Image (cartoon, rainbow, N blue to C red):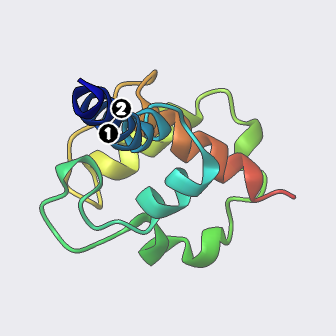
Amino acid sequence: MKQRGSVAGMMLCLSVAVSVPVFADKAPSSLQGKKLFNSSSLGGAANTKTCNACHPGGRGLESAGGNPELSKVINTCIAGPLNGSKLEPNSIEMQSLLLYIKSLKQ
């Protein structure tokens, strides 16, 4: 009987340990945005370009964070130079990219 309790406890601990990373990826972050900015697979890109290829280290984007149309501009770059598919404006990926680009002014 006691052994069953310990197995159930281990299962609960395993369940919690496995669930934590899943929830961590559910919120946008500037760190995730930076990774996407440097990813050659952003938007399912069909070539090896990244946002960083045209904007090394985010150079030239320091004031872009104030642009109310920034998500449209990002999608233009993804669909054009990266040859990928546009991101949904409210997606975690887009929101993460916006956070990263807005962080560049700091």
Q: Is residue 48 left or right of residue 94?
A: left
Q: Which residue type does callout 1 highlight?
A: Met
Q: Nearer the viewer, residue 90 or 76?
A: 90
Q: Residue 70 in the image: x percent, y percent? A: 58, 36
Q: CA distance from mark 1 to mark 2?
A: 4 Å
Label 2: which secondary element: helix
Toward the viewer: 7 or 89?
7
Which residue bears the numbered disc 1? 10
| Residue 59 location (% of width, % of height) | 67, 72
Tell me: residue 17, above or below residue 103: above
Which quadrant of the rendered structure holds the N terminus?
Answer: top left
Element at label 1: helix
On the rendered structure, is 99 left or right of 1? right
* Amino acid identity at mark 2: Gly
Name the residue at 27% across, 28% down. 8
Number of marks drawn: 2
Question: Which of the two residues, 46 or 69, is positioned nearer the viewer here?
Answer: 46
Q: Where does residue 98 sit, x and y in percent of width and height?
A: 60, 41
Image: 35 above or below 85: below
The extreme right residue here reads: 106
> Residue 99: which quarter of the image?
top right
Answer whether labels 1 and 2 touch (C-beta < 8 Å).
yes
- Categorize mark 1 by other alpha carbons within 10 Å: few (<14), some (14-19), many (20+): few
Q: Is residue 30 above or below residue 52?
A: above
Q: Quadrant of residue 5?
A: top left
* Quarter the C terminus occupies: bottom right
Of 96 and 15, the residue lying toward us = 15
Instruction: Please tell me which residue is depicted at 23% across the width and 60% down the height of the picture.
Output: 41
Q: Can you tell which mark lies on residue 9?
A: 2
- The circle drawn on residue 89 is none
Q: Residues within 10 Å of mark 2 (few under 14, many from 20)?
A: few
Residue at 65% across, 51% down: 101
